[in-house]
Image: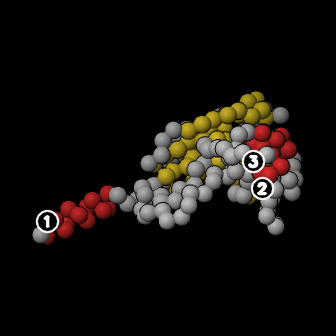
Amino acid sequence: MKRLGVGVAILLLAACDAPWDGPTLPDGSTRLSLTLITNEGPIGMSPNILASTSLSQLRGEVTSLPSGTNRTRAQLCQGYSGSDPCWNRQVDRPGRLYLAVITTPQCTSPTKNASAIAGHTLYYIEWVGHAQRTCGAAQAWPSWSLFSASRSDLPSSGTLTVRLQFQGTAEGGVESQAALT
């Protein structure tokens, strides 16, 4: 009976994530500090990542993509009192790169995020841990999050590849490109 208890304990521990588990930066990259502007962007289809040195251009790109609903752009941008789902109240700031990221909300699994830069590639890494509970709530619609990075931390010119990379129990990723003008 004691062996059975030890075996069950080992199985339970194997299904849990250690406190130090989390995203690993790609080889040759260095940590990049991103500033979260808001995680209350328009709903959309995940996963995706976009970047631009112009917030208005990025806003247009995000709202022109399919949302997975039959809502119009105006309906997507119609917020509740005090909300700003299409970032219309945000102002372009010189010297910033804007990054829009959308991932599927995780109801049962912990997530941790990191960002890094290596040459002309910016990485946004989402690590997804093992499921640790059941989800009793309705699954939320994915919505875009808006970040910014200082241009002084990025290459001064050229094309920047922005890569959303999944780690942990999630795999894969997507990428796009942005001109550094």
Image colouring: secondary structure
Q: Quadrant of residue 177?
A: top right
Quadrant containing the C terminus in the rendered view: top right
Which amino acid type corresponds to the residue marked 3 in the rendered image? Arg
- Circle 2/circle 1 CB separation < 8 Å: no
- Which residue is at the far bottom? 2
- Which residue is at the far front? 70
Provide residue 134's location: percent of width, then percent of height: 44, 63
Q: Which mark is residue 3?
A: 1
Could you tell which of marks 1 and 3 lies nearer the N-terminus?
1
Instruction: Estimate how packed mark 3 is, as few (under 14), some (14 to 19) or many (20 or more) residues with alpha carbons within 10 Å.
Output: few
Instruction: Estimate how packed mark 2 is, as few (under 14), some (14 to 19) or many (20 or more) residues with alpha carbons within 10 Å.
Output: many
Quadrant containing the N terminus in the rendered view: bottom left
Which amino acid type corresponds to the residue marked 1 in the rendered image? Arg
Could you tell which of marks 2 and 1 lies nearer the N-terminus?
1
Provide residue 31's location: percent of width, then percent of height: 61, 48
- Which residue is at the far top? 158
Provide residue 152's location: percent of width, then percent of height: 77, 45
Which amino acid type corresponds to the residue marked 2 in the rendered image? Pro
Circle 2 residue = 85
The residue positioned 73% from the left and 51% from the top of the image is 42
Distance (Cα) linking label 1 and label 3: 57 Å
Q: Nearer the viewer, residue 57 or 81?
A: 81
Could you tell which of marks 3 and 2 lies nearer the N-terminus?
3
The residue positioned 54% from the left and 64% from the top of the image is 137
